[in-house]
Amino acid sequence: HNHAAEIDPMRPRPHVGPQVGVIGGGIAGLSCASRLQELGVAVTLYDTGKRGPGGRASSRLWRGQVADHAAQFCEARTPMFVSHMEELLRDGKVKRLAEGMLCNLVKPGVVEPLDDNAVLRFVGEGGMGAIADAAVGYLDDVRKDVWVSPNNGIRQGPNGKWLVRESKSVERPFDAIVIAHNGKCAERLTSRIRARSTHMLLRTRFAAKVGSGGVGGGRMTLNSMYSLLFEVPAGTLPVALGACSFVQCEPSLRLLSNNNAKHGAAAGSTENQNNVAAAANEIWTVISSGTFGAKHKAPQENLPAEVEREVTSLLLEAIDRVAGLPPHTLSKRVTATKLQLWGAAVPLNVWSGGPYTWDAENSIGIAGDWFDHSGAVGADGVGGAGGVADEAGGGGGGRAVSAAATTAMPSSIESAWLSGRKLADHIADKQRRGVDAGLALGPDGGTFVPTTGGGFGPSDGVSQSSAWVTPPDKSSGGASGGSPRSSGGSSTAVSEATEYLFVRNLSYETTEAQLSEYLEQAASLGAKAAYTGAAKFGVDSSSSAAATATATKSSVVAAVTLLTGADGRPRGLARIRM
């Protein structure tokens, strides 16, 4: 699809409030940009996706049929989002998902229907991408397939304007910036800016479950999942699986979805069942667990052929088991497969400080599906179970979840849409634009709260405590266009660098939890015990000594981050904040 509207450079542009650049074309970015334009604010949306905006709400035409390879449906629980989805329904952009089309796969071959059929659920007409297409069609200025580099892709100029680097020779000025994506790219994109609290909240850890992070070590945690499209003759898998089955009896799987059943016809119509029965082949989507994704992680942009074969085979065998089919049924009947590693898949924790953030001094905000909305939002076939309808948290300035809360509702399309819209309302309001929102760090501020079910399914466990974020050093603001660690030899570089310890020559199998435990032991037992135990984690003796020397100065490890290369593979190097 050509999502970007043609831009007439002579067309008068609205200039109510600041000119805003939105980085990220997922639902949060699209919602924010659409609302800003609706309120008369000039906005440009940057999307790095090669197939068009949408993020998790994306679909593709494969083997002549529509296939959703990420979110399989969305729920609408808050009045604001229900109204939006009903408008899309009237416009023919979405349709209701019929009752009885969702179930839980509780035992191999045994399904139980969901007992919350009163919840409004929708799928896009012609794929989940239709939800994103509706927003894109409304926007005046969408920059498709523009790679805003994580290395100095945004910076603050001498006049306070934000500059977005669209290419090697082109930088475009904006009065305000919205970061509407996450993961390592967002972390790196903001690593050199002066808005240090914004950067602190975008730091990311990749894991299959949430760790404690230590005192003040709260950090967004994302898992990795595999999404496999496969084509089989109609009737190969039991009809009882419905349109979408949440898998509860197989540790490697989380979701199994029949794209034909979802997109055959309007919900509730007998034509839907007739279309499914008449199709010669069915396109199914299976999404792995985060644990499986972590175990078989590989460079997502270029999966090695041997990894693709192994992962595809393992997933098909797992589907055989949960569907109650004889072994190797699918491998014998499958006619085509397409595997994708979703490296930054689902947030396993959410920020309790509000539905978005806004730094008034630096005119930069964050929107995303990882902000809490007081349990207001539902699921999307990726994020987990739904929550309780509630319109709370609209102001964005306070904490939506108690610091003592142990779990929160998972991320979803709805939470992303609400986050973007509420941030847009804040930016467009001249008085509110001068007030911070959602950025309260430290022990009295917001916390990263693990989501129910670990963000996706009951087997991806979570820790039982939320974690707050250590505020940045007030003196260590990132210089314009430069690294906060290299500010002309000032004391800033020293104060920030001394927080960290780097450990090298680690075994590639070492986990953050193991290394954190080892360092805590080193702090309490002393250098000799630490040196002796170094081999347990594959740490060389020189690194062990350095680790012990530093660890014994403090009994608390705030955070451990295993560093990876550009290809996503471990480097045998860890950064420890004491």
Image: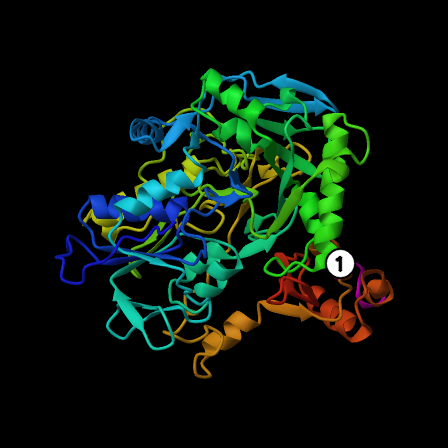
In which quadrant of the rendered view does residue 167 lie? bottom left
Picture coordinates of residue 59 (x, y %)? 48, 43
Which region shows up in magenta? 523-529
Above or below: residue 55 compared with residue 325: below
- On the question of residue 549 being in view, the answer is yes
Per the image, label 1 sits on a secondary structure element best described as loop
Q: Residue furthest right?
A: 532
The quarter of the rendered structure image containing the C terminus is bottom right
How packed mark 1 is, by other alpha carbons closer than 10 Å (few <14, some 14-19, many 20 or more), is some
The stretch drawn in magenta includes residue 526: yes
How did the renderer colour the structure?
rainbow
Picture coordinates of residue 259 (x, y %)? 54, 33
Pointer 1: what residue? 510
Residue at point 50% right, 31% down? 379
Viewer-proximal residue among 270 and 88:
270
- On the question of residue 397 being in view, the answer is no
User: Left or right: 268 with respect to 524?
Assistant: left
Residue at point 46% right, 61% down? 472
How many circles with numbers are drawn on the protein?
1
In which quadrant of the rendered view does residue 269 lie? top left
Picture coordinates of residue 511 (x, y %)? 72, 55
User: Left or right: 391 with respect to 503?
Assistant: left
Viewer-proximal residue among 387 and 9:
9
Q: Which kind of residue does numbered mark 1 sit on?
A: Thr
Magenta stretch, overall SS: helix
Residue at point 15% right, 52% down? 16
Above or below: residue 514 compared with residue 103: below
Viewer-proximal residue among 125 and 282:
282
The stretch drawn in magenta includes residue 475: no
Picture coordinates of residue 546 (x, y %)? 73, 73
